[in-house]
């Protein structure tokens, strides 16, 4: 309780910062747009962002409610053209300074979040002041009301999330394409230097056999044996290449058994705990398989481990893989172990790798792949609270009444002058009220139908936001 | 004359296997190309030995292996020789798990050496085992850090490898240019070091060694 009062006091004290900030903002905006001193605008916008961010942080610390940053991603630094000049629109510059400034200006002015922040700053002191009585009587509830006010203007919109996702996807796509290309080159080299060369050698040996077979059958026989051995070696080589592309056991058995096969092949004593009700998508399986394979061989090679544990578990649609070994620890991704490669592979699925490897061990690597499994696996699609479900049922059960009998049917009776009132409310009223009531009934009915459809569709804000697309970037 | 069933989806290899086996005095009772056909063939014909590819239609996963395992569950000890483009210790374990022998697991390339391949088929038909040298090499590599194995002499390791592949004392003595009594001495010493109960029966002996290596 006392802590809450302290928090409320902090919030109110922040008004002392906000009011001068409002004045400063007003002056700077006026100077920027009325007098053309546009260079003032970015620093002004950044100042407001800092204040807003401070409130987001405080709210997260106090209430645990996360208000995401709504800002569009910062523009990348300008890239020089082949001739060393920097282009901004139709003008060329020698230094990147002006184009960078232009980009920054466009980024700040064009971001709706900048203006929502300004509105928030302008109104926030008033809102806080209005809430003072509530803060005093029920600080807990007062804070909650204040948080929902902040969420209204400070939270991320679906549009800004989409923009953030696009830039994130562009980055991960480039990473994935790069590692794919590197993979292809490696396979090409393996096939070219190994398999292809060996096949050429076999072909030549067989050619020699053809010439020798009549004159010197013994030599021909020896050469044939050699060709057979060479074909065996080629197959061994090819098997190695195939294992690097897509391990057969993964294709045949899926991730769980493939990881078990890895555990058996490892010189370490590896225990495997797999809890996977179905098979994930093939690319996810491959990424996880290669990551586990790399980690186990790292543990055996550098970590001097004796035992290891691989744990694959599913939570909702997220996949978590934990690899623990009892080695020396002290693994460092910067020292060029395969960890960077694993991270790159996982990045394509938004996966993250967490490494905990104190010197002296043990080493634990946790890989989280969020939402890589189909939603229906999770089995707990967001359910509506009971009161909402009841409301929807009641709406569906009653919406027909104002729409059809009381609205449309009454209107038809009136249009055709049928002299029957039955139970239609409008027709029992004085003449002047009849049409307005009929219109009102139809509106009410339609509204009830709309609500009945909209409540289930929007009740889960997270899901609503996640499913937003550029053609329907709903805002909260 | 031994009755053989062949399950292989590649026509060339299937045909080659049929000819090879017929030339060596086997009678091929069926040559099938898919998992369901294989299973019904195994159960109805009860061949003296079957040669089964791991990957078969319709799913092209481990159809053949599953059919072989299912058939052996109903008919324990039904002799099956599994062929594959790659060998996995995981599959070897599953095949050996019932401990009844009469099982083989070889890379497809071993067919190139007709003599050795036919020898392996005969061994499996007679209730023995035929494990691919690559399986054994992997098995020993993943057991490398285990104490008793590290104590074996190089010669004993060679004997152990040959024994794990399923060879009899006579075959081992031929391959390693040792006298049969020397091989017997080595095997006794290996069994003593690994703490296994000695057995005169070749097949039992092999299964004991494989079970030991797989016990980790």
Image (tube, coloured by chain):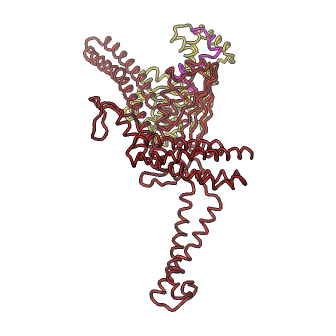
On screen, residue A286 above or below B121: below
Residue B153 is one of the magenta-drawn residues: yes
On screen, residue A40 above or below A261: below
> Foreground: A106 or B169?
A106
Residue A86 is one of the magenta-drawn residues: no
Q: Colour of chain A?
A: red
On screen, residue A456 above or below B116: below
Q: Is residue B109 left or right of residue A376?
A: left
> Foreground: A118 or A100?
A118
Number of marks: 0
Residue A13 falls in image quadrant: top right
Q: Position of residue B122 (x, y in %)?
A: 51, 25
Q: Position of residue A161 (x, y in %)?
A: 48, 46
On screen, residue B8 above or below A126: above
Q: Colour of chain B?
A: yellow
Q: Position of residue A84 (x, y in %)?
A: 29, 29
Can residue A215 be seen in the rendering of this structure? yes
What is the residue that sits farthest to the right in this orientation?
A1
- The magenta region covers B126-155
> Foreground: A202 or A31?
A31
Identify the residue at image location x=55%, y=74%. A400
> Foreground: B178 or A361?
A361
Can residue B29 be seen in the rendering of this structure? no
Identify the residue at image location x=30%, y=33%. A93
What is the residue that sits farthest to the bottom in this orientation?
A419
Q: Position of residue A231 (x, y in %)?
A: 38, 21
């Amino acid at each position: 309780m006392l802590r809450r009062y302290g928090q409320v006091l902090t919030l109110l004290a922040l008004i002392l910062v906000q009011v001068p900030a409002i004045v400063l903002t007003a002056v700077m905006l006026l100077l920027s747009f009325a007098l053309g001193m546009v260079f003032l605008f970015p620093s002004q916008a950044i100042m407001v962002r800092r204040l807003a961010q401070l409130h987001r942080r405080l709210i997260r610390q106090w209430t645990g409610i996360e208000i995401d940053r709504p800002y569009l991603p910062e523009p990348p630094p300008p890239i020089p053209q082949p001739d060393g000049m920097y282009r901004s629109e139709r003008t060329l510059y020698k230094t990147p300074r002006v184009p960078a400034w232009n980009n920054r200006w466009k980024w700040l002015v064009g971001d709706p979040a900048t203006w929502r922040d300004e509105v928030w700053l302008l109104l926030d002191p008033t809102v806080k002041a209005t809430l003072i009585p509530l803060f005093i009587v029920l600080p807990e509830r007062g804070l909650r009301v204040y948080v929902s006010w902040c969420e209204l203007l400070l939270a991320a919109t679906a549009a800004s999330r989409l923009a953030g996702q696009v830039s994130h996807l562009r980055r991960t796509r480039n990473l994935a394409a790069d590692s794919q290309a590197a993979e292809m080159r490696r396979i090409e080299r393996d096939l070219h230097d190994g398999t292809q060369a060996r096949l050429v050698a076999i072909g030549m040996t067989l050619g020699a056999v053809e010439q020798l077979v009549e004159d010197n059958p013994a030599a021909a026989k020896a050469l044939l044996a050699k060709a057979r051995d060479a074909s065996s070696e080629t197959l061994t080589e090819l098997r190695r290449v195939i294992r690097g592309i897509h391990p057969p056991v993964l294709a045949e058995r899926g991730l769980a058994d493939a990881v078990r096969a890895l555990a058996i092949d490892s010189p370490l004593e590896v225990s495997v705990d797999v809890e996977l009700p179905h098979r994930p998508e093939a690319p996810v399986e491959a990424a996880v398989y290669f990551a586990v394979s790399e980690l186990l061989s790292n543990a055996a090679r550098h970590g001097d481990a004796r035992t290891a544990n691989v744990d694959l578990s599913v939570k909702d649609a997220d996949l978590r893989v934990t690899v623990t070994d009892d080695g020396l620890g002290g693994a460092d991704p910067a020292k060029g172990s395969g960890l960077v490669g694993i991270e790159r592979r996982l990045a394509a699925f938004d996966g993250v790798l967490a490494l905990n490897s104190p010197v002296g061990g043990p080493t634990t690597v946790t890989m989280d792949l969020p939402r890589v499994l189909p939603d229906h696996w999770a089995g707990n699609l967001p359910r509506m609270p009971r009161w909402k479900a009841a409301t929807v049922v009641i709406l569906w059960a009653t919406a027909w009444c104002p729409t059809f009998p009381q609205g449309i049917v009454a209107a038809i009776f009136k249009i055709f002058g049928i002299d029957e009132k039955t139970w239609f409310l409008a027709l029992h009223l004085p003449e002047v009220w009849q049409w307005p009531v009929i219109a009102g009934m139809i509106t009410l009915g339609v509204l009830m139908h709309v609500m009945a459809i909209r409540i289930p569709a929007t009740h889960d804000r997270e899901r609503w936001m996640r499913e937003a697309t550029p053609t329907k970037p709903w805002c909260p | 004359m031994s009755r053989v069933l062949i399950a292989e989806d590649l026509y060339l290899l299937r045909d080659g296997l049929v000819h090879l086996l017929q030339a060596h005095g086997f009678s091929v009772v069926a040559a099938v190309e898919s998992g369901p056909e294989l299973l019904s063939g195994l159960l109805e014909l009860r061949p003296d030995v079957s040669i089964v590819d791991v990957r078969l239609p319709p799913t092209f996963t481990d159809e053949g292996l599953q059919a072989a395992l299912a058939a052996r569950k109903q008919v324990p000890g039904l002799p099956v020789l599994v062929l594959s483009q790659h060998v996995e210790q995981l599959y070897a374990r599953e095949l050996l798990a019932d401990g009844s022998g009469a099982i083989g697991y070889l890379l497809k390339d071993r067919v190139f050496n007709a003599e050795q391949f036919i020898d392996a088929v005969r061994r499996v038909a007679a209730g023995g085992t035929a494990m691919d040298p690559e399986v054994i090499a992997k098995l020993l590599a993943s057991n490398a850090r285990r104490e008793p194995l590290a104590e074996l002499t190089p010669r004993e390791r060679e004997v152990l490898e040959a024994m794990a592949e399923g060879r009899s004392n006579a075959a081992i003595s031929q391959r390693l240019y040792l006298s049969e009594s020397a091989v017997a001495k080595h095997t006794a010493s290996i069994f003593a070091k690994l703490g296994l109960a000695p057995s005169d029966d070749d097949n039992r002996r092999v299964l004991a060694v494989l079970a030991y290596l797989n016990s980790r």
